[in-house]
Every structure is written in structure tokens, then in C-alpha cells.
């Protein structure tokens, strides 16, 4: 039915690619492209003979717009799935615009170089005007809305789990469960154990930037920012048990505040063990989380990139990770004039994910929704021209696909609330 160019071949991309191959009625042809061709070839070889999807591979530098355009024009895809790094979002969006092809990604843009003067000036202006200081925000990609609309193209932003599925959960709650949603608490629990003293479950550079930043939440029409890890709660998660969780800034808060009518407060919490937090604080204190280049023995290195090289590759954690994840949204609001609460969530087993696609659950819960988001665009079930986040579309077909593709969801009425 469709031909898709998939940029990236890491842990999340590998899951998305495998899931595309399980939906070959839609994904008739795919091309896997990344900077390292050997990784693409190895995955293609592993999938050969297991799917009706025709798989091709290519080498491409996702920072090079000309190279991207050359590949897009040569392959002629119906959609570009960006499952590379968020640093590359804008370059790939530019290439899609130039070549006239639809676009999607799993995480919103942030810069690799925090010292870039153009980005820094805009960042400082946004911090002052909006009130949150996260390094990532939607504004850079939202600026493309009219460009994609005028070109008759669709750009879907953040079709992972959080962001992504959590926003679809919100749209579903708004459509079916509530007349008015007043509060949303997004809870992300990873109860998995990989056995390492310290490792990150997705790209270490992105993960450590996110976790070490100030937290923030949306309340009564404005942002409230707090010190990193300063708001802690406990919650008893289905399938996992009682875990400590901490308030973080997260990108879907920004879009949900615009798109969920009447919402008064949105918060995001993620679970962390004490060992992880201790390691992270020590690394931060000695400067290993810095993105500013330093000179070492006659060459320039970026500390956090050096750290990334030392840590286990997230894609290698699958065989040794045991336990489950639980990610979902708790809502309060009103239905038919009465107070109502509800909790929509998914529980995912690390070992079951590895049996199916040789991945741990963190990559699985992001890679599956990437495939589903692409499927929504390719089948025309999500058909708007411009730049959109998942909650701006009809949630029902996406929710159906979650159940069919390994991420079944539950709804609990009257859940325990987060204070």
C-alpha cells in the first residue's frame, strides 16, 4: 500500500521497523536509513524471509538536508518516519517540505549545541515570556504549521508513548469519559531492572538532559517551575508496585494545555530509583552532563557525549531487563454534571517485549506508537494538513491499534489520585 523512509536504526527505530514489517498490508516497502549503514543492513538481514514488506537500506547523514533530499527524491516515499535524534527534527522537516512528503517523529526538537546564539536568544526570550526553562519546546516545529499546510502536507509530532500515547489517552478521555477535564497527571513508571549500577533506557544524552533540568507544570493558565527533583510522590502501580516518582517538565504538557479545553492543571511524574539519582547527581557535579566542549589532550570533546560512549547502549539492555512498565494518565473532571475520576494506562513487560522484537519495554513503548502514528497517516484515518500533535486527531483508531499491536490499555474508575 505505502512506501516509507525510516530514518534511524537504534533501539526505538528497530522496534518500529519490526512492527511495520508485521503490518505489511500497509507498509509494503520500507527503506531503513542511518549514518551507519552496517546497522541497517544487519537488521534488514535479520528480517529477511519473515515479512512480506520489501526492505531496502541506505546511508544518510540526517544533519545534511541536501543528502536527505537526494535520498527522498530517489526513493520517493509516501512518508518519512524520523526516529533519529530530536536534534535533527528541523533538518528532516525542511527536507520533507522541499521534497513534498509527509513527516512524523517521536520527540520534539531540541538543539545539540546549547551555545548556538540563534537558539540561545530565542530560548532566553521564551524562558522569560513562558516561564519554563526546558531545553526542548514545540515552538520551533509549530513554526512550520503554515508551511506544511500550504504545501498540502502532514507533520505529526511526538508519536511515541510520552509524548504520543499519553496525548491520545487525553483525547480519548475528552471524547468519551468527560464533559470537562480539570486535571491531568501523567505517570511514567519503569519497574525494570537491567542489573547495571547505572544506565539509561534511551539515548543517554537526551535522557540525562531531561532528568537534570528544572521541573515544571501547568496550573491556572501559567507555568510553574520548580528545582530539579524537588517534588516527590509515591504511587502503587499496577503490575509494578509502590515506586517513588518525581515531577519533570515534559513536552506534551505544552500541547495539552492548548488542546484540552478547560484543563486547570497538568503534571508529569517519572519514577527513579535512588541509585540512578545518586549517580546522576555525581556526574552532574563533576561536569559530565555538560554540553559545552572542552579541550582534552589537544582535542575537543563534549563531556555528555563522552559519557554516552561509556554507558551501556540502551539497545543492548533487552536481554537482561526484567520487570514491567506502567504509563498512563489520571484525570479528574465532570461528566453529566457529576464529579468523575478515571485512569487510562498500559502495562508492558520487558521480557515479553524481548521475546517479540528483541527489545526492552522502553524502546517497545515508543517504537510501537511510532508505527501506529505512521499507519494513521498512511491509511488516511488521520488526515489534516499542517503540523499537529496526536491529541488533535480522532483517538479511536489509534486506541484500537494499541490493543492490536502489543500495547493494550485499561481504564480504571475512581483511581487513587496523586496529591
Image (tube, grey):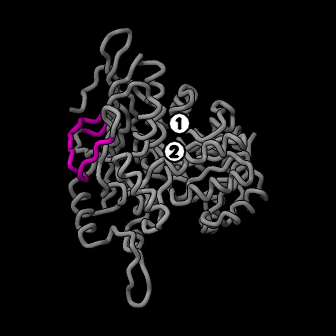
Which residue is painted at 48% across and 47% down in the image? 138
Q: Quadrant of residue 377?
A: top right
Which residue is painted at 32% across and 55% down in the image? 211
- Residue 246 among those drawn in magenta: no
Residue 342 in view: yes
* Residue 48 spot, x, y in % from top left: 68, 55
Which residue range is magenta in the image?
223-241
Viewed as shown, does residue 103 lie left or right of 410? right
Between 143 and 324, which is closer to the camera in this rendering?
A: 143
Residue 320 in view: no
The label number, if any, that marks residue 263 in the structure image = none
Between 50 and 160, which is closer to the camera in this rendering?
A: 160
* Residue 191 spot, x, y in % from top left: 31, 46
Viewed as shown, does residue 285 lie left or right of 268? left
Q: Quadrant of residue 36?
A: bottom right
Mark 2 secondary-structure assignment = loop
The label number, if any, that marks residue 390 in the structure image = 1
Amino acid at each position: 500500500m505505502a512506501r516509507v523512509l525510516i530514518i534511524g536504526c537504534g533501539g526505538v527505530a528497530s522496534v518500529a521497523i519490526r512492527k511495520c514489517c508485521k503490518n505489511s498490508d500497509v507498509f509494503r516497502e520500507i527503506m531503513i536509513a542511518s549514518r551507519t549503514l552496517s546497522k541497517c543492513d544487519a537488521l534488514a538481514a535479520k528480517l529477511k524471509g519473515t515479512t512480506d514488506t520489501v526492505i531496502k537500506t541506505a546511508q544518510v547523514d540526517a544533519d545534511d538536508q541536501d543528502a536527505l533530499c537526494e535520498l527522498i527524491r530517489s526513493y520517493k516515499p509516501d512518508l518519512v518516519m524520523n526516529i533519529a535524534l530530536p536534534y535533527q527534527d528541523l533538518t528532516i522537516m525542511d527536507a520533507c517540505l522541499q521534497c513534498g512528503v509527509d513527516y512524523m517523529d517521536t520527540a520534539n526538537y531540541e538543539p545539540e549545541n546549547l551555545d548556538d546564539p540563534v537558539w540561545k536568544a530565542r530560548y532566553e526570550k521564551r524562558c522569560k515570556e513562558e516561564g519554563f526553562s526546558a531545553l526542548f519546546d514545540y515552538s520551533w516545529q509549530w513554526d512550520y504549521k503554515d508551511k506544511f499546510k500550504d504545501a498540502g502536507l502532514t507533520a505529526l509530532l511526538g508519536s511515541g508513548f510520552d509524548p504520543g500515547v499519553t496525548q491520545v489517552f487525553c483525547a480519548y478521555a475528552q471524547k468519551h469519559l468527560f464533559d470537562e477535564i480539570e486535571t491531568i497527571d501523567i505517570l511514567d513508571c519503569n519497574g525494570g531492572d537491567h542489573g547495571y549500577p547505572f544506565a539509561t533506557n534511551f539515548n543517554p544524552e537526551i535522557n540525562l538532559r531531561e532528568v537534570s533540568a528544572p521541573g515544571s507544570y501547568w496550573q491556572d493558565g501559567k507555568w510553574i517551575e520548580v528545582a530539579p527533583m524537588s517534588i516527590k510522590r509515591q504511587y502503587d502501580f499496577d503490575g509494578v508496585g509502590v515506586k517513588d516518582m518525581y515531577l519533570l517538565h515534559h513536552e506534551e504538557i505544552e500541547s495539552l494545555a492548548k488542546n484540552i479545553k478547560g484543563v486547570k492543571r497538568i503534571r508529569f511524574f517519572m519514577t527513579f530509583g535512588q541509585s540512578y539519582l545518586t549517580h546522576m547527581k555525581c556526574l552532574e557535579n563533576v561536569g559530565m552532563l555538560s554540553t559545552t566542549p572542552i579541550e582534552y589532550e589537544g582535542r575537543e570533546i563534549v563531556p555528555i557525549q563522552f559519557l554516552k560512549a561509556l554507558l551501556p547502549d540502551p539497545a543492548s539492555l533487552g536481554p537482561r531487563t526484567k520487570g514491567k512498565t506502567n504509563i498512563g494518565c489520571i484525570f479528574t473532571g465532570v461528566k453529566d454534571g457529576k464529579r468523575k475520576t478515571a485512569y487510562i494506562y498500559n502495562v508492558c513487560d520487558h521480557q515479553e517485549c524481548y521475546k517479540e522484537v528483541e527489545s526492552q519495554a522502553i524502546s517497545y513503548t515508543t517504537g510501537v506508537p511510532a508505527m501506529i502514528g505512521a499507519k494513521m497517516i498512511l491509511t488516511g484515518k488521520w488526515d489534516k494538513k499542517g503540523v499537529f500533535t496526536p491529541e488533535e486527531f480522532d483517538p479511536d483508531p489509534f486506541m484500537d491499534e494499541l490493543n492490536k499491536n502489543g500495547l493494550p490499555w485499561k481504564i480504571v474508575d475512581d483511581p487513587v489520585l496523586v496529591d
